[in-house]
Image (cartoon, helix red, strand yellow):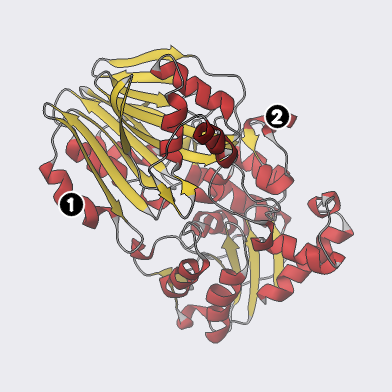
Amino acid sequence: MSGLFGVISNSDCVETLFLGTDYHTHLGTQYGGLAVLGEDGFQKKIHNLSNSQFKSKFIEDYEKMSGNSGIGVISDKYEQPLMFQSKFGTYALATNGLITNKQELGEELIKEGTSFTEVSDGNINTTEFVAKLIASGKTLVDGIERVFEKITGSISIIILNHKGIYVARDKFGHTPLIIGEGVNCWAVASETCAFPNLGFKVKKFVAPGEIVLLTKEGIQSLKEGGKTNKICSFLWIYTGFPASTYEGINSEIVRERCGIALAKRDKVKADLASGVPDSGLAHAIGYAMESKLPYRRPLVKYTSGYGRSYTPPDQKTRDRIAQMKLIPIEEVIKDQRIIVCEDSIVRGTQLKNYTVTKLHNSGVKEVHVRVACPPLMFPCIYNLSTRTYDELAARQAIYEIEGGEIEDVSEYLDPDSEKYEKMVELIREKVGVTSLMYQRLEDMIDAIGLPKERLCRYCWDGCHHQEE
């Protein structure tokens, strides 16, 4: 997942753009970029963030930029924002999402005579691809609508030109875009945590498929949103920042409610409740609130500089971050029966090798892992997160139980079935913990507080948007 931010103001906006974009650092690890429009035209900078932080890369650049409007992005894979000269004029574009039929559509465009310049390892840059699709429209807005019609997956878009900032949320609302109002300025963000310290108040949650234009005067509606809303549930469970709110519901509060739900179903005896930093902490606070166990920190994260072990695209980087970021406190761990709340178990290797092993090496008596969401069963098809079936711990367990791949995994989705119990027990053995319990899907949905039909749950139950 990438993070998008844009701002338009009656005065210079570059510092606000720099800081607002930085508040999205938790969403991407590969590239950061800024594009600014001022009296002298466009200015753009892109840097690789794989071995550094956004602030350190852009601190000198932003001080040399000036303008009243700009967009920024923290990108999960491709370089952006990109600049284009087109029949619609010059504009800068940034995107967030995953287009699963990009290769197929790209080949069609190439046959029609289109060329792509931003190609890495044979993969077309998604942002350039979106720009080529937009170019097929009669107007900029018509081009955006054509993108939504042609693609499978999801894509949200922000465009900067002389008219202002075009904001388009993906057709199913999988990724959020929120508009904030400041003093003589307006902003759009993927994460509302970018707003408070910069003086913005939430003005509008952009609807799925909706297109609006931000100008210095305010919000101009260009296309109404659709009725289908399938926002990613994982935003509240893990991906989003604790201070962020989506569809009016705060992430930290949801995580506390997840922990409460886990504790209500649990009967294990323990000495303390803890969470895997950072996203597991709020789940653990909720667990401690309900269970009356003391909340303690047997594992602490060494600064935010190590980033998140879930978002990097390669396993080697994920493992290095997981190994280095958590430091055990033996004085808290030794001879204790510990509840460890985790946001999810994706691959399972990091939990085993870099969390549980550290607890065992520090003399823990028992480790009881409590997971805030159900077992991940399907790779995400709407964003760059889980990528293959082989990566998923639950699928690995099913493969071992069944002696190979199977198409129908419905029994493994039922937490009251024998096969589900076998799957969880096998994962428990591989992770090396005393007990393992996952959140039930209905409890997770209740914790979020939106109707089931308004949430994307694909990675847990495999239900496509068009099936509901």
Task: Determine the residue positioned at 53% across, 49% down.
Answer: 384
Q: Is residue 454 left or right of residue 396?
A: left
Residues under numbered marks 2 and 1 in contact, where contact means CB atoms less than 8 Å apart: no
Q: Secondary structure at mark 2?
A: helix
Is 7 placed above or below 397 here?
A: above
Looking at the picture, tell me which residue is in the foreground, 284 or 229. 229
Quarter of the figure that contains the C terminus: top right
Q: Count every numbered label the image shows and give the total.
A: 2
Within 10 Å of disc 1 (Cα), the crowding (few <14, some 14-19, many 20+) is few
Q: Which residue is mark 2?
A: 466
Looking at the picture, tell me which residue is in the foreground, 278 or 406. 406
Q: Position of residue 7 (x, y in %)?
A: 27, 30
Q: Which residue is mark 1?
A: 59
**Disc 2 and disc 1: Cα gap in Å?**
44 Å
Please say whether residue 468 is visible from this viewpoint: no
Q: Amino acid at mark 1?
A: Ile
Q: Position of residue 125 (x, y in %)?
A: 43, 44
Q: Position of residue 430 (x, y in %)?
A: 70, 75
Looking at the picture, tell me which residue is in the foreground, 448 or 1. 1
